[in-house]
Image: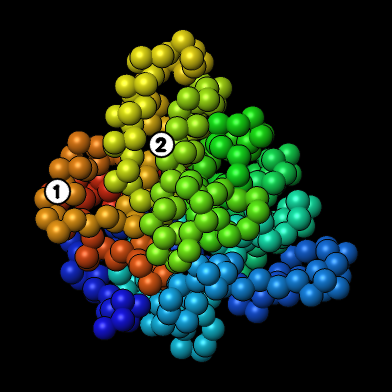
Amino acid sequence: MNVMERKQPKAATDPLAGEIIDCDVHPIVPGGLKALYPYMPEAWCQRLDTKGASVGLSPLSPRTAVPNGGTAIRPDTTPPDGGPGGSSRDYMIEQLIEGQGIQCAVMNSLQAAALAVALAGPDESAALCSAFNDYFLDEWQVADGGPLRLAMVVPSQVPELAAQEIDRLGSTKGIAAVYMPLINIPMGNRHYHPIYAAAQRHGLPILLHVTGTENVYHGPPVIAGGWPESFVERYVSLSQVGEANLVSLVFSGVLERFPDMQVLFVEFGCSWALPLLWRAEKAWRAVRFDVPWAKKSPFEYVNKHVRFSTQPLDEPDDPTHLKQLIDMMGDHLLCFATDYPHWDNDMPGQSLRMLPEDSRRRIFVENSQKFFRL
């Protein structure tokens, strides 16, 4: 059976059904950019129309496209009335929320993120991010309550405009986080300070997520060692982006400057974090004079400020090995994620079943309750 056609477990198979918080769901705007025109000034609509601008389901090139028709979307997520998986609010609620026992799902738009960092210019990206945010708040009724929340996307190319967008929507009901798509500048760099300051003002955590543009376009983060030759090479190597930015965050002094800042690394995996922190801890103790502004140890900073999504789970042949890693790392650092509607998603009924009930409850429910503004 093709991996994209595997059947998803029913919610009844998970004892936490009805309580689970999913921190990574991808809604899609059907119909391309023209669906956003009601949420943009006329001048921007005319500009995009004149350029023939469009946005697809994936920014990947043929070199790194998913080897199954070029789409990462599960065929069975297609709504009954057509359109790509993730494009229907009602069907997402039926299939994911009700079907998998999800209490609350935090959405982030990869279409918007790709435009924010690479596929649009700086000013265009700001206008488009605002339009995407307003579209989901309105069309998906995010601001009206219900099970869906939005990680509002901001134009990382222009931090001042990103801060303005956070100030514009930061108090809006339904906004759970700030989705800050990464460009090829490490997180500790002063470039991002206006975004951090605005997020902290509004009590919103920062959500990081791959955009599909990494190592494909100029501007987004690159992967160490060179240009990947296939989808598999790129997919496996994406955790490097998370590793480099966690190191930058810990040693830059950002977490001293913004003491209430919270950061969630989503879809970078999580099994790399513990050995990376072992190395960071050793280096910090040996040469603290090199980064005197990093006043606490890497483990202290991460325990207070940083969380990681469970998806994509690295699953060894012996599940107890993953349990041992989580025990050493601390289950307080993990937040459950499905990555719906993508083919490599991790549904609740099949995830982390080797963990004891109290540990699963922390990961699937309590950690996200504390982290997001829900």
Residue closer to the observer: 350 or 69: 69
Q: Residue, x 43% and y 76% (percent of image)?
A: 67
Image position of 337 (left or right of 91): left
User: Looking at the rendered structure, which numbered label has been put on residue 246?
Assistant: none
Q: Which residue is mark 1?
A: 321
Residues at discs 1 and 2 in contact (Cβ within 8 Å): no
Q: Specify whether residue 28 is in view.
A: no
Q: Which residue is mark 2?
A: 306
Q: Amino acid at mark 2?
A: Val
Q: Amino acid at mark 1?
A: His
Q: x, y percentage for residue 142?
A: 54, 61
Q: Which quadrant of the rendered structure holds the N terminus?
A: bottom left
Q: Please rate how many residues cluster around mark 2, counting C-alpha atoms within 10 Å: few if below 14, some from 14 to 19, many from 20.
A: many
Residue closer to the observer: 225 or 242: 225
**Image quarter of residue 6:** bottom left
Q: Please rate how many residues cluster around mark 1, counting C-alpha atoms within 10 Å: few if below 14, some from 14 to 19, many from 20.
A: few
Q: Mark 2 falls on what kind of element?
A: strand
Q: Residue, x 73% and y 75% (percent of image)?
A: 34
Image position of 69 (left or right of 103): right
